[in-house]
Image (tube, rainbow, N blue to C red):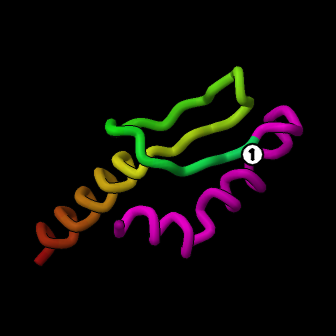
């Protein structure tokens, strides 16, 4: 899946974790996964922030539409 590869290769989740580490509890983790919906959320029971691949797909579609609109 393109979104999964993009998230892994870009280091996006690691970057987000570093960027917001000072504002989050120390044990907070960031995870990317398939959720069957376009979403990102905080799970307080697991102390993790989840980024859904479906939301990444939406962002990619919007970027592609924007690029095509400029041509």
* Residue 58, x across and y down, in percent: 29, 51
Work out whether residue 60 or residue 30 is closer to the camera in this orientation and state it. Answer: 30
Q: Residue 57: image x %, image y %?
A: 31, 55
Q: Quadrant of the N terminus?
A: bottom left
User: Could you tell whether 37 is left or right of 17 in the image?
Assistant: left
Dominant secondary structure of the residues highlighted in magenta in the image = helix
SS label for mark 1: helix
Asked whether 7 or 60 is in front, the reply is 7
Q: Is residue 10 magenta?
A: yes
Would you place residue 62 above or below residue 23 in this image?
Answer: below
Q: Residue 8's spot in the image, x, y percent?
A: 55, 68
Is 20 positioned to the left or the right of 25 in the image?
left
Residue 3: quarter of image: bottom left
Q: Residue at x 78, y 38 (%)?
A: 28
- Residue most toward the top? 45
Which residue is located at x 22 percent, y 67 percent? Answer: 64
Label 1 sits on residue: 20
Q: Please check the rendered image and state whether residue 53 is part of the magenta-colored stretch, yes or no.
A: no
Residue 46: % across, % down: 71, 29
Closer-to-camera residue (47/68): 47
In the image, residue 37 above or below residue 13: above
- The residue located at (35%, 69%) in the rendering is 2
Crowdedness of circle 1 by 10 Å Cα count: few (<14), some, many (20+)? few
- At 37% across and 46% down in the image, what residue appears? 55
- The image quadrant where one finds the C terminus is bottom left
Residue 14 is drawn in which quadrant? bottom right
Q: Which residues are magenta?
A: 1-28
């Amino acid at each position: 899946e393109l979104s999964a590869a993009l998230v892994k290769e870009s280091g996006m989740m690691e970057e987000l974790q570093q960027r917001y580490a000072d504002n989050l509890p120390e044990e907070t983790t960031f995870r990317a996964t398939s959720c069957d919906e376009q979403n990102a959320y905080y799970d307080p029971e697991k102390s993790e922030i989840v980024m859904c691949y479906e939301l990444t797909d939406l962002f990619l579609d919007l970027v592609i539409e924007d690029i095509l609109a400029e041509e």
